[in-house]
Image (spheres, grey):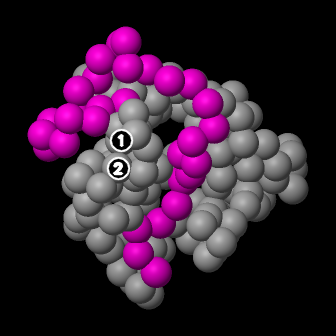
Amino acid sequence: MLKYHEFEATTDPGLYWEKNLLNKDGVAILVPGQYRGSHTIGIHQGKYEALKQQKPMKVYRDRNKDGDYDLIKESIQEGIFGINIHRATSRKNGKSIQIDKWSAGCQVIAVNDDFKMLMELVHEAGRLYGKSFTYTLIESKDIV
């Protein structure tokens, strides 16, 4: 049986991290593509269970702090940067409508209940198929 779920999420880093860079090369913006086995169940920032990056992924780096994310091919880096998949809020029935400090390049789900559902699905899939998960990022322009 095929199941489909759609969650409000962002792949953009928050403006806070653009202005207060964690990496001298700039803020991280994930390059669209498929990253096989890129994530596993783990603890995000030592706080709660999420999907943690375990294999290299490609990111654009933008360090000019102008509020416009430059996706320049020459700025691409590949590595393990902590591009996790986590929630934006812990509030019961909560939803975050701003990125701010929630993401320095992670993939962040806006609605707490959606994140809970994702983690339930991840645990079910982990029991059936193993604890390594593939992440695929596509752009809305690629959806017909």
**In which quadrant is the C terminus drawn?**
top left
- Circle 2 residues within 10 Å: few <14, some 14–19, many ≥20: some
Q: Is 74 rendered above or below residue 83? A: above
Q: Which amino acid type corresponds to the residue marked 1 in the rendered image?
A: Val
Identify the mark nearer the N-term, 1 or 2: 2
Image quadrant where residue 97 sits: bottom left
Mark pair 1, 2: CA separation: 6 Å
Q: Which residue is mark 2?
A: 21
Front residue of 66/108: it is: 66
| 1 vs 2, front mark | 2
Extent of the magenta region = 61-90
- Cβ–Cβ below 8 Å for labels 1 and 2? yes
Left or right? Give the position of 97 relative to 115.
left
Tell me, yes or no, if residue 138 can be seen here. no
Which mark is drawn over residue 27?
Answer: 1
**Which residue lies at the image location 86% right of the left edge and 46% below the top edge?**
130
| Residue 59 is at least partly visible in this image | yes
* SS at mark 1 in the image: strand
Residue occupying image coordinates x 32% and y 74%: 95
Dot 2 amino acid type: Leu
Residue 77, magenta (yes or no): yes
Secondary element at tag 2: loop
